[in-house]
Amino acid sequence: ALHRLRQRYRQLLREEVAHTVATPAEIEDELRHLIAALRS
């Protein structure tokens, strides 16, 4: 159940980030930046 929850959260986060970038190629970079910011 936890695995499915994490997958769903990852999918929702990716969809939200996709709305904030100009191209789909930027999604991964933006996610990495977001995760790095949350870790610090």
Image (tube, grey):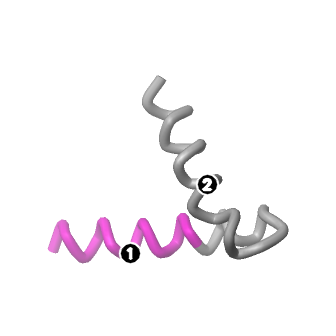
The magenta span reads 1-14
Q: Residue furthest top?
A: 40
Please indicate whether residue 16 sits to the left or right of residue 28 in the image. right
Circle 1 packing at 10 Å, graded few (<14), some (14-19), many (20+), is few
Q: What element does badge 1 sit on?
A: helix
Please identify the quarter of the rendering in which residue 31 is found. Answer: bottom right
Identity, as a three-letter code, of the amino acid under mark 2: Asp
Please identify the quarter of the rendering in which residue 37 is found. Answer: top right
| Quadrant including the N terminus | bottom left
Residue at 49% across, 43% down: 35
For the image, the number of numbered tags is 2
Magenta stretch: includes residue 21 = no
Depicted 17 relative to depicted 4: above or below: above
Q: Residue furthest right?
A: 22
Find residue 39 and report its horizontal and vertical position in percent: 43, 30
Residue at 78% across, 64% down: 21
Magenta stretch: includes residue 13 = yes
Residue at 64% across, 53% down: 30
Circle 2 packing at 10 Å, graded few (<14), some (14-19), many (20+), is few
Depicted 15 relative to depicted 33: above or below: below
Reading the image, the residue beneath label 1 is: 8
Identity, as a three-letter code, of the amino acid under mark 1: Arg
Find residue 6 and report its horizontal and vertical position in percent: 30, 66
Q: Earlier in the sequence, mark 2 or mark 1?
A: 1
Q: What element does badge 2 sit on?
A: helix
Q: Residue 29, which numbered label?
A: 2
Please identify the quarter of the rendering in which residue 34 is found. Answer: top right
Please indicate whether residue 6 sits to the left or right of residue 21 in the image. left
Magenta part mainly helix, strand or loop? Answer: helix
Please indicate whether residue 27 sits to the left or right of residue 35 in the image. right
Q: Residue furthest left?
A: 1
User: Do labels 2 and 1 touch, CB within 8 Å?
Assistant: no
